[in-house]
Amino acid sequence: MLSVGLLGLPNVGKSTLFNALTAAGAEVSNYPFTTIDSNLGRVPVPDPRLAALEAAVEPAESTPCHVQFIDIAGLVEGASRGEGLGNRFLGAIRQVDAVVHVLRGFADPGVAHVFETVDPVRDAGIVETELLLADLEVLERALEKRRRLWKADPRAHAEEEARLEGWLERLRRGEPLRGEGAEPAARGELKALGLLTGKPLLYVLNVDEAAVTGGAQGAGRQDAGSGAPDVTELESAPGAPPVLRLCARLEAELRELEPAERREFQRELGLETSGLDRLANAALELLGLIRFYTLAHGKLRAWEIERGATAPQAAGRIHGDMERGFIRAQVAAWEEVVEHGGLHQLQPLGRLRTEGRDYRIRDGDVVEFLFSP
Ligand code: GDP
């Protein structure tokens, strides 16, 4: 399961967002490997395709993909120097797959702002600087050890040396390492070292309710009347992380309602999709993951996998034995399964494809694996 860390300055709405995310029947537990006050929540990823398959196939059981969100106590300026929660805080996010950086975009004078004014671009810069400084320290320390090793056998380590020294240069120039993980070897190294600026990043701009509802229903509420602050500067840089706008407080309120009531209220507010649904899906997308579905023994299940994965790799996502003993896969697009009420109904129609080891799974495939145990 992929894990996503929520970070940001204090009072930006991280906990509100985390509570909203986990209110939907997710399990919340204390973060097991640190002593700081952070929480883990396993959140189902809302999936309209899975819902359509459920309605068509009526399985005994249906399981969506899950994302693990980790709420980490607020970051303060100076964290990289060990101030505030400092390095313990940073340690907690070194192991996540992706980072969601929550930015304060709501005015509300009733909620103190660490820097007095609402300025998400400035805040993003402050947090980014802390992450850069923390990475610089980690990498410098790692390099000190490795340079001694490299000296003993320079040829054998030329590639690793060039890569890590290159990263150090980038960090010294104040450039994050995002995008360096395109190659699997580099990605593994970024993760092993726990370099924070190398992780895929998504900004959540936590805006006033009026900014997401168009103001109509927000009128009269405490935080009505202000639009979303301008974050063009964050969004327009080449390769800039995506920015997702939502109102955490409203999302939390919506989560407290029964599903039918929630849909009604959402419609009244003119919210087409809930911000939380967009967030969970954006996290999958950020990591370049696609979803496929299996339908076996009355159990429907969604699985996430890297784009470009082959059929045996997808089988391995379910069980190692299935990858090792992979024979072939029966595949159909989810729309066809919905239309005909099941995978096997497609066989007599000649619409169930048989695919071999080289087949690359497509987003939305419904797959049945044949394997020799
Ligand atoms: P954290 O320190 O980043 O975890 O922030 P919290 O989630 O604890 O929120 C800090 C304060 O901001 C709380 O009083 C929240 O009720 C309030 N808050 C969070 N999200 C919103 C929002 O979208 N709009 C408004 N007006 N207040 C919010």
Image (tube, rainbow, N blue to C red):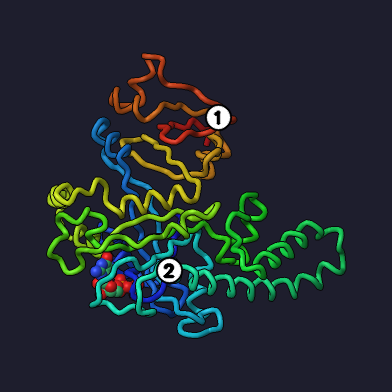
Quarter of the image with the N terminus is bottom left
Badge 2 marks a residue whose secondary structure is strand
Residue at 48% across / 80% down in the picture?
77
Could you tell whether 263 is left or right of 12 in the image?
Answer: left
Residue at 73% across / 71% down in the picture?
143
Task: Please provide percent x and percent y for residue 15.
Answer: 32, 70
Q: Residue furthest top?
A: 349
Task: Please provide percent x and percent y for residue 272.
Answer: 24, 45
Residue at 37% across / 14% down in the picture?
348
Residue at 52% across / 69% down in the picture?
128
Please, is residue 192 above or below residue 72 in the view?
above
Alpha-carbon span between mark 1 and mark 2: 38 Å
Query: Quadrant of the rendered structure where residue 101 is?
Result: bottom left
Task: Please provide percent x and percent y for residue 355.
Answer: 52, 25
Could you tell whether 97 is left or right of 279 in the image?
Answer: right
Q: Quadrant of ligand 1?
A: bottom left
Could you tell whether 366 is left or right of 57 in the image?
Answer: right
Residue highlighted by disc 1: 359
| Pointer 2 local density, CA inside 10 Å: few below 14, some 14–19, many at least 20 | many
Residue highlighted by disc 2: 7
Badge 1 marks a residue whose secondary structure is loop
Q: Residue furthest bottom?
A: 83
